[in-house]
Image: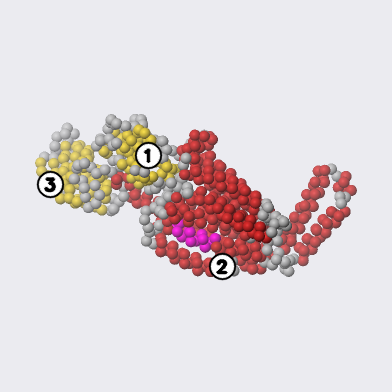
Amino acid sequence: MKTLTAGRLLPVLGTLLAALLCALGPGAGSASAHAALTSTDPASGSVVPTAPRQVKLTFSEGVLLSADSVRILDPQGKRVDEGKPAHVDGKSDTAAVELAGGLADGTYTVAWQAVSADSHPVAGAFTFSIGAPSKTAAKVATAEIDPVVDALYTTGRYAAYAGYLLLVGGCVFAGVCRSSRPVQRIAVGGWITLFAATSVLLLLRGPYTSGKGLGSSFDLGLLGDVLATKPGAALLSRLLLLSAAAVFLAVLFGSYAREDGDRTRMERRDVAYGLAIGGAVVAVGLAATWAMAEHASAGLQPWLAMPVDVLHLLGVAVWLGGLAALLAALWSGEPVRRAEVQRFSRLAFTSVCVLVATGLYQSWRQVGSWGALTGTEYGRWLLLKVALVAGMVALASFSRRWTGRLTDGRPASASKKAASAVRTVRAATGAAKAAGPSRKEKDASPERAAQLARQREALEKAAGRRQRDADEARSGLRRAVLAEAGVAVVLLAVTTLLTGTQPGRAETEQRQSAASGGARTTAPAAPGPAETRIPYDTGGTNGRGTALVRIDPARTGNNSLDVSVTDPTGKAVDVPELEVSFTEKQKNIGPLRTALKRTSAGRWQATGFQLPMAGTWQLTLTVRTSDIDQITEIRNVKIN
C-alpha cells in the first residue's frame, strides 16, 4: 500500500540501493553464521611424530558443545578421548578434547557435531595419523537429522513467522486503523499459530540437533538439555511473552473495543496509551526471541545486528500482517472507511522504509561482496526477496489508486440491478420476519425449520455480497490487496528460507578456507626436515624401487633437496634419469624444477632451491629406468 506521498518512495529506494552498491563493493571484515570448521590441530590428514595432548577444532563462529560433540576413535573404532569437550581459553568458536595416554601409531578419526551460534546443527569428521598412517581407520557416520523431524521442524519455523506477522500486524491494524470481528480473527489466529508452532519447535529442538527420531520429543532429559541452550531459552521466553500477549488481546478486542458510555475520553486515551506501550514491549520481546537465537546473534557486530533484526521483523509484521487484516475487513463486506485505509497506507509506507534501511545493513553484513550476492545460495535467495518486495511496492500503486476513489457514503456508481436485488431480498426477508413463521414452517420438523433458517441466512449473505461487489472502488481495492497478499505469502516463504540458509559471507569464507588447504594450514610446524618415501615400479627389468625425498628445512625460502634411490633389497641403485618438481595447485604456482646433481651411487642433491610460499605443495617425481621404462609419482608435502 502507498500513501498520497508514496511517490517519494522511489527516490528513497534509489538512494538506499546506491548505498548498497557502495557497501557491497569493498567488502568488510570476517563474519559468518552457520558454523564451518576452519582449522584443526592436528591438521586434517596430517602425520604427527608423537601423540598430541589434545585435539582442537576451530570454527568460523561460536558453537554450543555437548558431552559427545567431539569423539576420537583409534584404527579399530575404540574411543580414546577423555573428559568432555570444552572451549579453549573461553573462546566459543573453539572445541578441544583431551586424548588418552600411550596411544599407538596409526590413523585416528575425529567425529564432531555441534550447534552453531545461529541455532543450526553442524557435523563432520576428519583423520590424522600418529607416527605413520595405518592400513585401516575407523569409519563413522556423522549425525543426520531425522527426515520426519526435519520436515516438522521446518514447518514449525514457517508457521511461527506467519503467526507472528498475523498477531502483530492484526493488533496494530486494530489499534490504529480499524477494530472489527474479521481483524480480531486475524490477530487471534496469529496468536494460536505462533503458540502452537513454538511449542512444537521446543519439543522437536532436541531431536533436531541430536539426530534422534520423533519418539524422543518427550524425553525430559533431552528437553532439559535444550532449555539450557540459547535457542531453547529463546523458545521458552517466547511462550512466556505469548501469555502476556493473550491478556493484551483480551483488552484490545474486549473492553477497549466496546464503546463504554461510563468511560470518559481521558480514561479511554489512558487505556490506549497503556495498550500501545504494553503491545510494543510484547512485540519487541517476541521479535528478540528470533534475533537472539539466529543469524543476528552471530558474526559481525551482533550488538548492532540484533536491534536491526528486531526492527526488520517488526516492519515486516506491520506491513504484511496489516495487509492480511485489511484484506479480511474488505472481504467481509464491512464498510471500511477511506480514512482507515489511508492510515494503513501511511503505516505500510513507513514499514517499507524501515525494511529497506534495515535490509541494506543486513545485506552488507551477511553477503559482503557482489560475488557472494550472485554466487551463493543466500545471495540468490536475497535477490529473489528484493524482487518480491519491489513487486509488492508496484502492486501497492494500484491499491493507492483505488483508495483515492473510495467514498464513505453509498457509491453513486452502484449497479441498479444489484441495488434492486438487494432491496428485493431484504424486503422479502423483512416481511417473512414480520409475519412470523408460516404454517408450513410450524408443521415442519425441527430439522426442516433449521434448514429454512439457513436458507434465509444464505440469502442475506448473498445480498450483502451483491452490495459489496456493487461498490466498484472497494471491489478494485480488494482485488489489489489480494494480489499483494499473494506475493506476501511467497515473500514470507523466501524470508524463512533465508533464515535457514548459510549467509553468503560465510559460504565465501568457507570456500576460501578449503581452497587454501583449510584445516591443514594450521598444522604445527615440523620439528625438522620433511621426508616422503615414494615406491615406484616402471614395469621393466629392475624397474622396482623406492625413492626417499628429503626437503630441508621444508620452509619458505632456500631449501636443500636430497633424493636417495634404492632397490627392493634396500641397496642403493643408479637410474638413468631422475627429476623432481613442485607445484602449488591452489595458487597456480609451478611446476618449479631444480637440477639434481649425482653425489654418489643412488643419491642426488640440489641446494638453494626456492619455495616462495607456505602451504601444501604437490611433489612430482619422475623416474626412468631404461630407454622406454618411465613412471611419474605424485605426493603432497607440507611447507611451513
Main SS type for the magenta part? helix
Residue 355, compared with residue 502, is above or below; it is below
- What residue sits right under mark 3 in the picture? 597
353 in magenta: yes
Q: Residue furthest left?
A: 600
Q: Taking 56 as reference, is 401 left or right?
A: right
In the displayed structure image, the side of residue 377 where residue 155 appears, left or right:
right
Pick whichever, 376 or 294, lies toward us. 294
State which tag comes first along the sequence, 1 or 3. 1
Res 524 label: none
Circles 3, 2 touching at the beta carbon (< 8 Å): no
Q: Would you say 291 lies left or right of 450 here?
A: left
Q: Residue at x 50, y 59 (%)?
A: 386
Tell me the element at label 2: helix
Q: Residue 84's x, y, as percent?
A: 38, 35
Task: State which quarter of the image contains the N terminus.
Answer: bottom right
Task: Give the magenta part as a residue range.
Answer: 351-363
